Amino acid sequence: MTTQVTQPSATVSPYPLHILLTRFRSIRSLAVTHLSKMLVQSSLVALALFATSCIAISKNFYPSSKRGLIYIPNSDFLSDDKVWVQKHSDLTWYYNYKMHPSPTYENNTSLQFVPMLWGALDGFDDTTFLENVTAQIIGGQNITYVMGFNEPDNSMANGGSDMKPKDAAKYWIKQLEPLRKLGVSLGAPAVTGAPSGFTWLAEFVEACMGNCTFDFIPIHWYGSFDGMASHIAGVLDVFPNKKIWVTEFALDFSSLAATQDYFQTSVKYLDGNKNVTHYSYFGSFRSFTSNVGYNVSMLNSHGQLTDIGSWYLGGDATGVIPGDNVVKPNVTAAKPSTSPYVVPALVTEGSDSLGLMNRPSIPYLGILCPLLALYISL
């Protein structure tokens, strides 16, 4: 049996074709107009948000006498030394983990040198540090502060001076305590931010039996801002009458956006904290030499100031992005403790190994922001 398929009859429009076309064009025009308004409104919102980002990221910091330099020499890029002593630089002091000033800044009166007794590499009977610093003071060198041992609770393989509290106490009394008679303020041993650092410092104070006098406490911190603020508060709880120097701090192995946010928040906090009298950010090196993630660096691989580098000196954002591209092979990585000693790692609050590869969400703000300003002015 054959089934017959009945075709549906066509619906006849009551309007002529030219009227339908006219109405369609009218509806299309209204839709395009409405869509255009929506796009303009969305663009204005996006433009406003972008402008806000430009204002926030390009704003420089107010001058601060607290700001210092961790000088990490690199013989392959000697010209970088001049970056930190530019005419309008905010830096007022520096240290290099050594007892004598760096030749580059030896005659620079605007940058005060702070000697450090790094450790006891030459034995606990040595008095070279005391003799050297005393000679500098007698010779007219402006030395009013001296820092004690660098991360004595940490192994030398990880950047510390690796000293037992009892030995450190005896060494302090021999090498540092006599400097107080010359009017020098002494900084306590700079322990790590790990809980073991607090333990070591407490044992050191006990071993001193009242014979070690320190005027300020250096702090090292690698991790979140909240962790750093909490750590500083904890130190002040134990030593309420001491001033704080934050002599190493950075957010290691994180994205550029997170690192910049940490930097801005931390510097504003340190500038506003009356208990903190000095601080020095760990990042005064080219990005590809960093061992704590290249985003902390104040110079990119070619020696140009990054946003963080320019902000730290008191300038505006540069738009220069740090990177890991190697400019010159066989360059020793920047070390967080001292150049003469092997320091490949740090004690950190917690590192994001993937953060090293992250890129900023808006990678060229330094270029786009000026273009935005030009557009607005037209």
Image (spheres, rainbow, N blue to C red):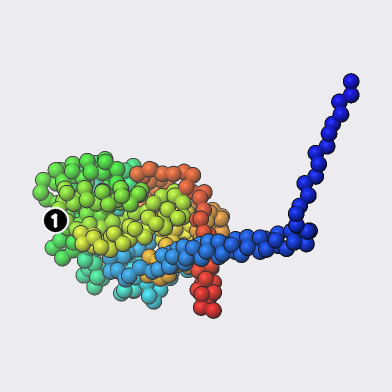
Q: For residue 128, which quarter of the picture?
A: bottom left
Residue drawn at (47%, 47%), measured in percent from left and top?
355
Horizontally, residue 32 falls left or right of residue 363, namely right
Q: Is residue 150 visible?
A: no
Viewport quadrant of the C terminus: bottom right
Q: Is residue 25 above or below residue 239?
A: below
Q: Residue furthest top?
A: 1
Residue drawn at (34%, 73%), measured in percent from left and top?
108
Residue drawn at (34%, 42%), measured in percent from left and top?
155
Q: Is residue 15 visible?
A: yes
Q: Which residue lies furthest to the left in this view?
A: 210
- Front residue (pair 64, 39): 39
Task: Give coordinates of residue 362: x percent, y percent.
Answer: 51, 59
Horizontally, residue 91 falls left or right of residue 297, namely left
Q: For residue 349, which quarter of the picture?
A: top left
Task: Give coordinates of residue 137: x percent, y percent.
Answer: 22, 68
Q: How many marks do you count on the picture?
A: 1
Q: For residue 201, which quarter of the picture?
A: top left
Task: Give coordinates of residue 143: x percent, y percent.
Answer: 24, 67
Q: How crowded is mark 1: few (under 14 residues within 10 Å), some or many (20 or more)?
A: few
Query: What amino acid is labelled 1 in the image?
Result: Asn
- Front residue (pair 342, 12): 12
